[in-house]
């Protein structure tokens, strides 16, 4: 461990689970190690792990694919950040459907278990590696989903080392829980509908699975751009909550005819876009609900059944089907920068206010996954790491 007698201590970088014979206890102002009081360098902290002891943290490890019970919290070695990396003390984790798919082995992963999960998180900078210029110790930050963090150092952990280009400052008016619910959803809505598909002022957008974590962010994004949101749900119990989350119109497809209701809402013109994360046979109904030159924008496939489309159903109204994955957009530094700036501006102005469905403690992350799979939620599921 590199220490200096004169350096100031903000927070002990080594955790209390360090193992004997190298024992550590700490207070907000000092560390007592092997009977000697030392102060730990707060900026650019580094650790020299020796045979005498290792520093550990809690992290979720998946050693085999399966149900929520496969999310096992283990002690894992906590390393210092490399060059251009920032070590973040994770305070809140935002859950995503892709992580459920990864847990069961239905998400494209570059490696097999054991793996770590977690695209999103918010917390505080604990330490910075060499050549980091944009962040400082103690700064509140949030993780920008990069598409690969779940197989390197995912956010399902007490601490996470993140390359600095995949971090951003947390908006001052948001809590860590709110910021952990912000980036995946709002970046997806902006990148898919506005930057990629070209939706613009005056357009009407059908939003399927509107109670999901992308529902409210999409409604707020469309409202900011003066577009009309038409939400769909198959649960009558969720209609009121979806309406309160910001949708202009809500259609309960279990009791209402989607095509007829969209025609009523759009004065018989049809919607300009269908923003769909479900797929499957119901895409045919979405196509019937669209206007001439309408577009189906697929960003998920919750229903893996074939769509069974008849080409003439597309050609008759010049319907386009587009596909979208957020990580393709975020891999482009210029698009990522524009998206982060857009979301920052929306959050700071109050136009974007994340809707949180429920908060679980870290030790109950398996129950959080169960809750997501139950489809009871309206909004984002958050896991708090204390």
Image (cartoon, grey):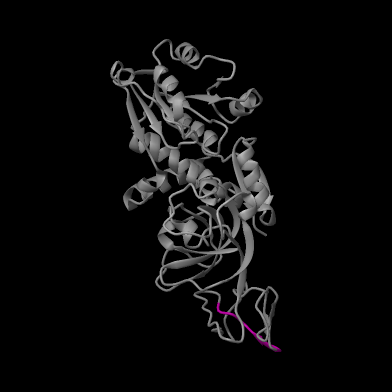
Q: Is residue 94 above or below residue 253?
A: below
**Residue 315 point in image, percent of width and height:** 28, 19
Residue at position x 61%, y 40% in the image: 373
Q: Is residue 38 magenta?
A: yes
Asked whether residue 140 is drawn in magenta, I would say no
Splitting the image into 4 quarters, where does residue 256 fall?
A: top right
Residue drawn 53% across the image and 59% down it: 116
Residue 20 falls in image quadrant: bottom right
Q: Left or right: 1 with respect to 386?
A: left
Residue 11 in percent (x, y) is at 62, 71
Q: Is residue 246 above or below residue 381?
A: above
Position of 315 relative to 68 (above/below): above
Q: Position of residue 344 (x, y in %)?
A: 46, 46
Question: In which image quadrant can residue 10 be found?
Answer: bottom right
* Count of marks placed on residues: 0
**Residue 336 visible:** yes
The magenta span reads: 35-41
Q: Quadrant of the C terminus?
A: bottom right
Residue at (57% x, 47% y) in the render: 95
User: Which quadrant: the N terminus?
Assistant: bottom right
Q: Nearer the viewer, residue 114 or 274?
A: 114
Q: Position of residue 280 (x, y in %)?
A: 45, 29
- The residue closer to the viewer here, 151 or 123, is 151
Above or below 55: residue 134: above
**Position of 65 compared to 85: left or right?**
right
Residue 10: in sight, yes or no? Answer: no
């Amino acid at each position: 461990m590199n220490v200096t007698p004169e350096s100031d201590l903000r927070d002990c970088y080594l955790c209390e689970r360090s193992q004997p014979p190298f024992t550590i206890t700490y207070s907000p102002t000092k560390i007592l190690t092997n009977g000697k009081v030392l102060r730990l360098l707060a900026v650019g902290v580094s650790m020299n792990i020796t045979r005498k002891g290792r520093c550990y943290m809690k992290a979720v490890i998946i050693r085999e694919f399966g149900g929520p019970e496969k999310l096992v919290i283990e002690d894992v070695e906590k390393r210092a950040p490399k060059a251009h990396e920032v070590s973040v003390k994770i305070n809140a984790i935002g859950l995503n459907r892709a992580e459920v798919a990864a847990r069961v082995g239905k998400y494209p992963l570059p490696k097999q278990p054991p793996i770590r999960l977690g695209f999103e998180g918010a917390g505080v900078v604990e330490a910075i590696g060499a050549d980091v210029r944009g962040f400082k110790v103690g700064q509140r930050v949030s993780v920008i989903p990069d598409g690969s963090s779940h197989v390197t150092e995912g956010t399902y952990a007490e601490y996470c080392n993140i390359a600095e280009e995949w971090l951003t400052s947390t908006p001052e008016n948001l809590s860590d829980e709110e910021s952990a619910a912000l980036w995946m959803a709002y970046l997806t809505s902006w990148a898919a509908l506005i930057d990629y598909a070209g939706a613009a002022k005056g357009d009407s957008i059908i939003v399927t699975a509107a109670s999901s974590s992308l529902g409210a962010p999409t409604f707020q994004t469309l409202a900011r751009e003066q577009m009309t949101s038409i939400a769909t749900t198959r649960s009558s119990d969720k209609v009121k909550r979806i309406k309160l989350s910001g949708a202009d119109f809500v259609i309960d497809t279990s009791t209402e005819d989607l095509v007829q209701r969209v025609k009523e809402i759009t004065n018989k013109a049809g919607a300009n876009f269908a923003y769909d994360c479900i797929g499957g046979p119901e895409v045919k109904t979405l196509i019937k609900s669209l206007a001439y030159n309408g577009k189906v924008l697929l960003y998920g496939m919750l229903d893996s059944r074939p769509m069974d489309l008849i080409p003439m159903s597309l050609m008759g109204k010049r319907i386009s089907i587009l596909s979208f994955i957020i990580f393709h957009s975020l891999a482009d530094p210029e698009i990522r920068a524009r998206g982060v700036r857009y979301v920052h501006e929306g959050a700071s102005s109050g136009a974007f206010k994340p809707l949180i469905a429920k908060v679980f403690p870290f030790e109950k992350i398996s129950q959080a996954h169960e809750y997501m799979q139950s489809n009871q939620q309206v909004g984002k599921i958050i896991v708090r790491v204390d």
